Image (cartoon, helix red, strand yellow):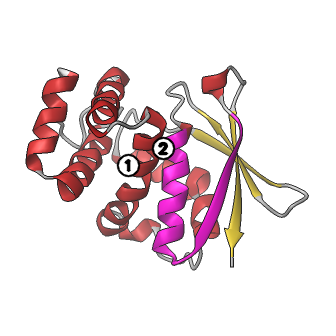
Amino acid sequence: MKGVVFNLLEQAVTDAHGDDTWIDLLEEADVGGAYTSLGSYPDSEMIALVGAAANKLDLQAADVLRWFGRAAMPLLAERYHPFFVGHVSARSFVLSVNDIIHPEVRKLYSGAGCPHFHFSQDADQRLVIGYQSPRQMCHLAHGFVEGAADHYRESVAIEHLSCMLEGDALCRLAVRWLP
């Protein structure tokens, strides 16, 4: 996993809970914590940090990942403003991930292993997002969608239709935009 993701997690944690909490998480997760944005680090370190946060906050790992995704979106908008230019809605922004955002991420961060998303619309007019990644962090994607909705001052309801964590071949999230 690219260091920029660890940097986002560090900033989200310190902004919400303070520097001492980040240090506590590093110690509990037994990871080094010196993450450079261009570096690559084992996925196991992110999993350990999420697990440490779940223990410290008495949450499930899925809840921590959703919180992190949502909290990271304003940081991404600040650091990578060009990715947001031209989008007037969260839906437009989310639909640009495969074609605009992830190719640029791969240019900026050599070796980035970005997840792949499939998009469709169901009979209820929900955006159905298929998520595939060996990391199986669909809850992080869920949080990113919520964060994008926040950024564009929208509200969404997200339902997990299938999940690799439950043995399914891929994760599918149904996103309904609320009035």
x%, y% of residue 96?
Answer: 60, 60
Question: Disc 1 marks which residue?
Answer: 68
Q: Quadrant of the N terminus?
A: top left
Residue 169 in which image quadrant: top right
x%, y% of residue 147?
Answer: 47, 62
Is any part of residue 32 visible from this angle?
no
Rate crowding at label 2 as few (under 14), some (14 to 19) or many (20 or more) other CA atoms within 10 Å. many
Using residue 127 as the reference point, say whether residue 100 is left or right of it. Answer: left
Residue 15 vs residue 8, the one in the foreground: 15
Labels in figure, total:
2
Helix, strand or loop at label 1? It is: helix
Is residue 144 found inside the magenta-colored segment of the image? yes
Residue shown at 36%/57% (left/top)? 71
Residue 137 vs residue 42, the one in the foreground: 137
**Residues in magenta?**
139-162
Check if mark 2's residue and mark 1's residue have beta carbons within 8 Å.
yes
x%, y% of residue 84?
Answer: 46, 70
In the figure, 156 relative to 120: above or below?
below
Residue 31 in which image quadrant: top left
Residue shown at 13%/52% (left/top)? 18
Rate crowding at label 1 as few (under 14), some (14 to 19) or many (20 or more) other CA atoms within 10 Å. many
Residue shown at 45%/42% (left/top)? 63
Rounded to the nearest angstrom, the CA distance separating label 2 from label 1 is 7 Å
What kind of residue is marked 1?
Phe
Question: Disc 2 marks which residue?
Answer: 140
x%, y% of residue 112?
Answer: 41, 36
Q: Quadrant of the C terminus?
A: bottom right
In the figure, 9 relative to 100: above or below?
above
